[in-house]
Image (cartoon, rainbow, N blue to C red):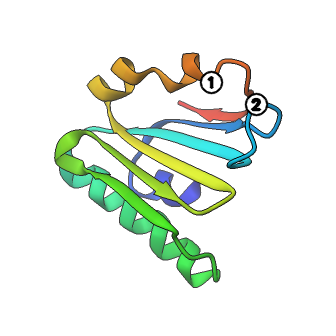
Amino acid sequence: MEAALDKQAVDILMLDIRQVTSFADYFVICSAESDRQINAICDEIDGVLSREGINIYRREGSADSGWVLLDFGTVIVHVFAQPQREYYDLEQLWGKATPVIRIL
């Protein structure tokens, strides 16, 4: 979450999804104000975790689509442009998940 904050991500939310699904333990959801910022946030998260020995399994989406997903196995990071975040509303979709922390 600090890596996202370092690149000025907003409305960062971590959800504990272990009681809801078996494919991951946590979702991290955050928003960015531009395509460039989406890429910067994703690159920073990937870089920080890589230095810690945590490698990305998959990167889906693109900044110009407004949604990039970073799959680190037990943690899945969603970086959204605000309109896409509102449209997909993962917080509501995964409403049974337990919020761990939210940084507005």
Specify whether 90 is left or right of 81: right
Q: In what element is the residue under mark 1?
A: loop
Q: Nearer the viewer, residue 33 or 66?
A: 66
Q: How many marks?
A: 2
Quarter occupied by residue 7:
bottom left
Q: Amino acid at mark 1?
A: Trp
**Residue at label 1?**
94
> Residue 53, position in %: x, y?
64, 83
**Residue at label 2?**
20
Q: Nearer the viewer, residue 96 or 4?
A: 96
- CB atoms of marks 2 and 1 within 8 Å: yes
Specify whether 20 is left or right of 77: right
Specify whether 67 is left or right of 1: left
Q: In what element is the residue under mark 2?
A: loop
Q: Is residue 11 above or below residue 69?
A: above
List the single residue furthest toward the front. Answer: 22
Rendered residue at 45%/64% (across/down): 58
> Residue 19, position in %: x, y?
83, 33
Q: Is residue 30 above or below residue 4?
A: above
> Residue 12, position in %: x, y?
53, 38
